[in-house]
Every structure is written in structure tokens, then in C-alpha cells.
């Protein structure tokens, strides 16, 4: 048997023995806790008091499967099937990127700049799992939030997260690189996007669990045109946004100055580049005061 006994200590020993070459002690401790709590339907308090917990053979086989998937570099969040983002639990699997902490900081920037009680229209373009859209809707209760996404698989995940969270987010199949976006019924106070922005040449700097499991179409752009999504979205946002509305992007940390120039060239003003908690330039905001046509 792969464990010496069917107790929590036995499973803990198995996890440490099997995963110590890949993960830190704290990472293993956290993953074990989440796997056990989810499998056994335990609360935090239950887990703390679970010293006498005994596992069935089916439970043990489940934990062994989790370990093997971790050893194969499958992301922990995909194995669990959900992740925490901005105080929400969201379903998470290989159909969309795993939400990142810096994206929570982007959401927080939008929330701190908004009137929480106001009625407003928001689009999240290249929405993926819908994490940005759901996080904004959870706080900005009176906002109408739309999630635009090209991938049918990701749109299915957004639908499941709508049901899972009980938050109303409107889904729309949309190619962000279209030459002309559909004319909306209303204009928008906020447009936000975390589009593909990693140059193909950066693949060698990325972890295997990302390259082997997360969807490439949500990650990479060609080296000779790394701003293709930003430019297309920014051009259209000038017509979609209301006067004084704002466009927010998550960006590559190496391209802050280029993004300032890009937004300026599209007619945005009051452009602000913001660093994340690691001190990296990872988000930018620009404001629309006139449309492209008004500037011509």
C-alpha cells in the first residue's frame, strides 16, 4: 500500500514524501488541507479537529490520483476544480486560465474608482473564466456586466460560474480582433481586458504546468505584433465608452511605456500606469473624453 495507515498523518506523510521535490512544505500543507476538506466535506474547524479521521480505500485512491496529477505538473486549481478570486469561489479548469493575484489588483483598482451604488455598464473583453466580470458584479451590485469571449469552452465555463455564484453576468461570443465591434444598446462606463499578451519568445521562461495545461490561445501573441489585442480593443473602446469612461488593461511588465504611447495614440487621456504588489508595471488605465470621430 502506498500509505502506511489510512489516517490524516498517513496521508500527510505520503504527500510530503511524494511532492517535496516539487513544492515547498507550506505549499504541500495547503494543498493537502484543501484536498481533504473538499473530499470529506469538512470546514476549517472540522479539519483542525480531524486527528482521528479515517479514510476509505476510495478516499486513498482519490488522494493518490491528486498526487500523480501534481507530479505531472497539472495545476493544483484544475485538480481541485475551483479557485478563490476576490473573495469568490469560482469553478476553474483547463478551459480557461487560472485567475492570478495581480488580476485581483486590477479588479480592486476598478472598484476603488467606482461608485459602488451606481448603475453602470461594464464589459470584460477576453473574459476567460469570467473572473474579472464576476468579481466586479459581486461588489458593483447595480452594474450590468458583460463577459465577451471567443472560446466556446470558456463561454461554457462562464455559464457554469454564473450558476455556481448566482451572479448575473451576460455572456457574448466575441472575437476581440474583429474590425468592427457590434453596436451596443448602451455605451459603457468601464471596459476592462486581460487579453493574450505573452510573446511566443517568452515560452522558455514559463513553468511547465502553464505550458502543458493552460490554454495557449489565452496566453500568447506573435513576437512581431505583441500589442495586437491592446490596439484593437483600445480603438473600439473609444467608441464604446461614454464620455469620461475608462479603459483598464492588465499588461506585460516589460511594455509599460509602449502601452502609455499606444493609449495616447488612440486618443485616451489621464493615462495611469500602475505597479502590482511586486513592484512590476502590470496594469494601465486611460480615459475617453472624445471619440475617434470627434478627434478627426
Image (cartoon, helix red, strand yellow):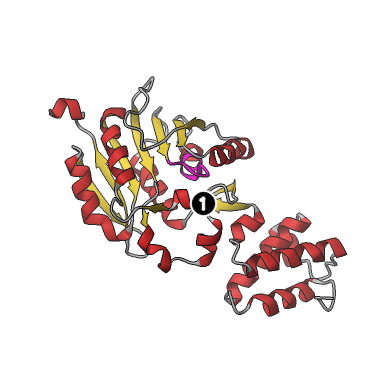
Q: Residue at x 84, y 65 (%)?
A: 55
The total of numbered circles placed on residues is 1
Q: Which residues are magenta?
A: 126-135
- Residue 289's x, y, as percent? 20, 32
**Residue 46 to residue 287: above or below:** below
Q: Tell me the crowding category of disc 1: few under 14, some 14 to 19, or many 20 or more residues within 10 angstroms, Cα based.
A: some
Q: Quadrant of residue 191?
A: top left
Q: 218 or 29: which is nearer to us?
A: 218
Look at the image and tell me in which quarter the C terminus lies: top left
- Residue 51's x, y, as percent? 79, 71
Q: Residue at x 58, y 75 (%)?
A: 22
Q: Quadrant of residue 1?
A: bottom right
Q: 156 or 35: which is nearer to us?
A: 156
Kindly identify which residue carries mark 1: 215
Q: 228 or 143: which is nearer to us?
A: 228
Q: Quadrant of residue 234?
A: top left
- Residue 112's x, y, as percent? 36, 44
**Residue 48 to residue 155: above or below:** below
Please indicate whether residue 251 sits to the left or right of residue 216 in the image. left
Amino acid at each position: 500500500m502506498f500509505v502506511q495507515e489510512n489516517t490524516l498523518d498517513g496521508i500527510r506523510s505520503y504527500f510530503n514524501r511524494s511532492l517535496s521535490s516539487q513544492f515547498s512544505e507550506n505549499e504541500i500543507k495547503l494543498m493537502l488541507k484543501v484536498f481533504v476538506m473538499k473530499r470529506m466535506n469538512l470546514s476549517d474547524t472540522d479539519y483542525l479537529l480531524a486527528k482521528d479521521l479515517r479514510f476509505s480505500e476510495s478516499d486513498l485512491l482519490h488522494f493518490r490520483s491528486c498526487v500523480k496529477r501534481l507530479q505531472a505538473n497539472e495545476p493544483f486549481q484544475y485538480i481541485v476544480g475551483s479557485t478563490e478570486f476576490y473573495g469568490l469561489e469560482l469553478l476553474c479548469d483547463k478551459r480557461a486560465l487560472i485567475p492570478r493575484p495581480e488580476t485581483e489588483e486590477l479588479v480592486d483598482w476598478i472598484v476603488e474608482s467606482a461608485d459602488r451604488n451606481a448603475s453602470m455598464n461594464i464589459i470584460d473583453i477576453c473574459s476567460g473564466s469570467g473572473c474579472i466580470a464576476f468579481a466586479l458584479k459581486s461588489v458593483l451590485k447595480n452594474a450590468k456586466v458583460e463577459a465577451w469571449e471567443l472560446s466556446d469552452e470558456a463561454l461554457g465555463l462562464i455559464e457554469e460560474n454564473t450558476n455556481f455564484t448566482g451572479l448575473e453576468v451576460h455572456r457574448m461570443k466575441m472575437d476581440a480582433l474583429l474590425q468592427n465591434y457590434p453596436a451596443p444598446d448602451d455605451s459603457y462606463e468601464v471596459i476592462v481586458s486581460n487579453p493574450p499578451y505573452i510573446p511566443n519568445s517568452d515560452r522558455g521562461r514559463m513553468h511547465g504546468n502553464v505550458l502543458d495545461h493552460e490554454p495557449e490561445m489565452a496566453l500568447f501573441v506573435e513576437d512581431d505584433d505583441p500589442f495586437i489585442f491592446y490596439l484593437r480593443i483600445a480603438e473600439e473602446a473609444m467608441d464604446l465608452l461614454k464620455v469620461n469612461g475608462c479603459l483598464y488593461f492588465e499588461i506585460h511588465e516589460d511594455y509599460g511605456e509602449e502601452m502609455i504611447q499606444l493609449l495616447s495614440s488612440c486618443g485616451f487621456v489621464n493615462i495611469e500606469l500602475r505597479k502590482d504588489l511586486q513592484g512590476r508595471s502590470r496594469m494601465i488605465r486611460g480615459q475617453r473624453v472624445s471619440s475617434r470621430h470627434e478627434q478627426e
